[in-house]
Image (spheres, rainbow, N blue to C red):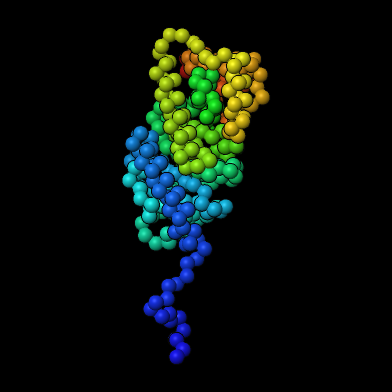
Amino acid sequence: MSLPPNHLPSNTVPSLSADESLFHSEKALELKREICEMGRRMWLRQYCEANGGNISCRLAKDRFLVTPTGVSKGFMTPDMLCLVDGKGTQILPTTGPWHHSTEFLTHLAIYDAVPHAASVCHAHPCHAGAFAIKQLELPTRLIPEMEIFVGRVPVALYETPGSPMIAASVAPLAPHHQSILLGLHGLICWGTSVEDAYFKIEITDAYCRTVLLAMPLPGMAAIPSEKIGDLMERKQKTGLPDSRFGLTPAEFCAMNPWEYLKGDFLGSTNANQKPGFLPDPEDLADRITKKIISQLKITK
């Protein structure tokens, strides 16, 4: 007996689409669990308040798992994760309360700029945040592990979170830096796995905390400039990026962390400056001139 159109026997299961099969695969479930675990760690370490922060990972060439908006990263479950394409459009789930983070456009800018990036984590850790709200690049030459595993941390100047402008400001930095401060906002890091991206958050914030604790103490020690080359050589062998590869000991010597950290910073270091954290001389002179003119106007 022939069946009526669009009628399936009760024991027939509709076939899943390619995206549905991918989203419910063992690989996807494993990554969902890892994202939830990294979210739990971020929340426990107070890197993301309330429903702040977001995590994503590359599931396929043009498919990404993304954390939901409006949910504490410490209390996510695998069923809350969303499947999003390379244009930022949510594919799954198509119904229900879970919608992907509105800041995923910034993640996409990193994935596009760094094809081998497997995951991106964004959080608001307080110690790194202290530098972010000053729009100050972190000093270097202070801790060997930071030099090798993270390196220079530049600042992407403030743009509205989730906007195309902030994505555009992060994109040129990502190929050379795994950890980037978002001015007046927080920290974003990419990694070769979900855990690696989270590790960059943890290492960066621990470094910021140590620097802030050390600032009131006497002394101006730093890793000798002639020994930085050894660390850069080790880092290059790992395949990790760093914009300072190829600098001479004299150029590293010019990056005095304690001179940088004291006094009036006269603004920030940012994506348009040369490697290191000392401002371009012409840019510095221009800002000093503008500040003097501003002060003269005030005193008139």
x%, y% of residue 282?
Answer: 64, 20
Residue 67 position (above or below residue 218): below
Please name whichever residue, 180 or 155, is drawn nearer the observer in this view of the structure: 180
Residue at image point 59% right, 28% down: 235
Residue at image point 43% right, 43% down: 54
Please name whichever residue, 289 or 127, is drawn nearer the observer in this view of the structure: 127
Residue 43 lies in quadrant = top left
**Residue 185 visible in the shown view:** no
x%, y% of residue 204?
Answer: 46, 29
Please name whichever residue, 70 or 199, is drawn nearer the observer in this view of the structure: 199
x%, y% of residue 81?
Answer: 41, 52
280 left or right of 70 in image? right
User: If the image is split into quadrants, where does the N terminus sit?
Assistant: bottom left
Residue at image point 50% right, 25% down: 145
x%, y% of residue 111?
Answer: 56, 45
Q: For the view shown, which residue lies furthest in the bottom direction?
A: 1
Please name whichever residue, 251 or 101, is drawn nearer the observer in this view of the structure: 251
How many numbered callouts? 0
**Residue 249 visible in the shown view:** yes
Q: For the view shown, which residue lies furthest in the top direction?
A: 218
Residue 299 position (above or below residue 3): above
Residue at image point 53% right, 40% down: 192
112 left or right of 221 in image? right
